Image: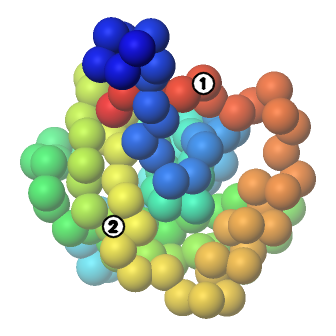
């Protein structure tokens, strides 16, 4: 029964994980501290009072381990979605070493933290 709505496809290449982490976001050296609420290998969602537009390219720094404040993941990101006080961004440039840190972090998360599939 193709096209009947019985089969909902997950369009995401990577699952999202519900977890809190530190985030700095903004342009160049004008960064604002915030908290992340979801992460995947492709991007993340963070809370922000800053006004971004979908399509904006911003600088993002992610602190996955609050016990190691010297170990940040640094990336250029594109704003993909804005919902109330949450901003969803996609990684545009992520160094190989930072991607490895991100994947290692995701591997430590519990399956119960995985977000259910959605159509967005």
Residue 66 percent location from the top left of the image: 77, 57
Residue at the farthest front position: 1
* Left or right placement of residue 41 versus residue 78 in this view: right
Assign the C terminus to one quadrant of the image: top left
Q: Residues within 10 Å of mark 2 (few under 14, many from 20)?
A: many
Which residue is located at x 88 percent, y 53 percent? Answer: 108
* Residue 78 seen anywhere in this rendered image of the structure: yes
Residue at numbered disc 1? 116
Q: Nearer the viewer, mark 2 or mark 1?
A: 1
Q: Secondary structure at mark 1?
A: loop
Above/below status of 113 relative to 70: above
The residues bearing labels 2 and 1 have C-alpha atoms spaced at a distance of: 23 Å
Q: How many marks?
A: 2
Assign the N terminus to one quadrant of the image: top left
Query: Residue 77's mark?
Result: 2
Mark 2 or mark 1: name the one nearer the start of the chain: 2
Q: Secondary structure at mark 2?
A: strand
Which residue is located at x 36 percent, y 44 percent? Answer: 88
* Residue 49 seen anywhere in this rendered image of the structure: no
Which residue is located at x 61 percent, y 44 percent? Answer: 15
Which residue is located at x 14 percent, y 48 percent? Answer: 54
Above/below status of 49 relative to 54: above
Residue 87 percent location from the top left of the image: 33, 41
- Nearer-the-camera pick, 42 or 77: 42
């Amino acid at each position: 029964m193709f096209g009947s709505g019985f089969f909902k496809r997950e369009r995401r290449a990577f699952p999202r994980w519900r977890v809190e982490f530190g985030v700095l976001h903004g342009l160049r050296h004008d960064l604002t501290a915030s908290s992340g609420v979801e992460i995947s290998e492709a991007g993340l969602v963070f809370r922000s009072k800053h006004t971004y537009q979908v399509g904006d390219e911003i600088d993002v720094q992610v602190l996955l381990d609050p016990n190691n404040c010297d170990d940040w993941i640094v990336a250029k990101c594109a704003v993909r979605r804005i919902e109330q006080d949450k901003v969803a961004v996609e990684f545009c440039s992520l160094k190989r070493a930072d991607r490895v840190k991100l994947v290692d972090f995701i591997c430590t998360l519990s399956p119960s933290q995985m977000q259910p599939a959605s159509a967005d």
